[in-house]
Image: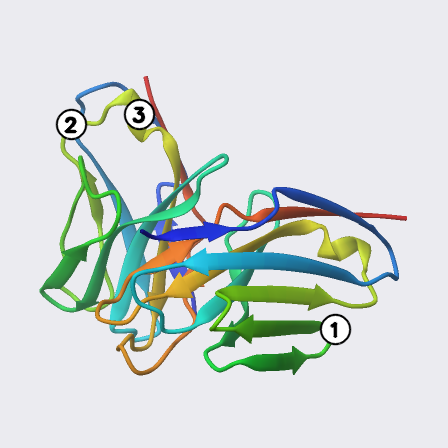
Amino acid sequence: GQNIDQPTEMTATEGAIVQINCTYQTSGFNGLFWYQQHAGEAPTFLSYNVLDGLEEKGRFSSFLSRSKGYSYLLLKELQMKDSASYLCASGETGGFKTIFGAGTRLFVKA
Amino acid sequence: EAQVTQNPRYLITVTGKKLTVTCSQNMNHEYMSWYRQDPGLGLRQIYYSMNVEVTDKGDVPEGYKVSRKEKRNFPLILESPSPNQTSLYFCASSPTRTSSSYNEQFFGPGTRLTVL
């Protein structure tokens, strides 16, 4: 079956580091995406991993382990504007579908 | 400005009254897709299109139709809307989507549909 799991909500403090985990089970796999979505707005692309390892992009990093079906998004030096939902999504081979998780709502407090 | 546009942004309608939500992109993207977003369920893919006249079903296609007569436009049609189609709808596009490459998707602003 196809399934993507991520925590529903997380809370962290401004200036801290937070890790949002994502586990996936998909019939085919062609990479793992992370999107950010502020309330009432459209999702925007953050990162993509297709090979195992860590991809760093400024304050945001994303990690993938294909053998474990696991990814995480790491946000450093948290800012209030990072309060948003973070969507984990799997791209599938053999077709052009994208499977999204339900998203993790991150609350950043002062 | 490169963008994906959707119209209308908000719509309240009644059961059974046919409606169309338009989607247009000005980035010359081949791939376009429609999603619905519901609380607790995340984004679910309705239909997608790899290019003009090429469309395929996503995970929740029942009750929806699409067409791709032009590269820039990908309308979503609800022939006979029902209350369970009340949702937030997003259109997205990306340059190319093949099994051996990736491309980020660019999302439109969303259409909030209520079916009474």
Q: Is residue A36 left or right of residue B108?
A: right
Q: Residue at x 27, y 49 (%)?
A: B22
- Tell me the element at label 1: loop
Mark-to-mark CA distance, 3 and 2:
11 Å
Residue density around tag 1, few if under 14, some if 14–19, many if 20 or more, within 10 Å: few
- Residue at the image point whose x is 24% and y is 23% from the top: B82
Up-down relation of residue B114 to residue B21 (above or below)? above
Label disc, if present, on residue B84 of the rendered structure: 3
Q: Amino acid at mark 1?
A: Arg
Tell me the element at label 3: helix
- Compared with A106, A67 (above or below) is below
Mark 3 chain: B
Label 2's element? loop
Q: Which mark is residue B80?
A: 2
Q: Are marks 1 and 3 on the same chain?
A: no
**Which marked residue is nearer to the observer: mark 2 or mark 1?**
1
The subunit carrying tag 2 is: B
Give me the disc on residue A59: 1
- Asked if badge 2 and badge 1 are on a common chain, one would say no
Assign the C terminus of chain B to one quadrant of the image: top left
Residue B49 falls in image quadrant: bottom left
Q: Amino acid at mark 2?
A: Ser
Location of residue B54 in the rendering, given as x and y in whole percent from the top left corner = 11, 65
Question: For mark 2, does the 10 Å Cα neighbourhood hold few (<14), some (14 to 19), or many (20 or more) residues?
Answer: some
Percent position (x, y) of residue A63? 60, 73
Q: Which mark is residue B55?
A: none
Task: Using the numbered discs, state the Cα–Cα distance from disc 2 to disc 1 in whole angstroms.
Answer: 46 Å
Answer left or right for B27 relative to A48.
left
Mark 3 residue type: Asn
Number of numbered discs overlaid on the protein picture? 3
Q: Nearer the viewer, residue B82 or A11?
A: A11
Question: Does any portion of residue B68 appear in the rendered image?
Answer: no
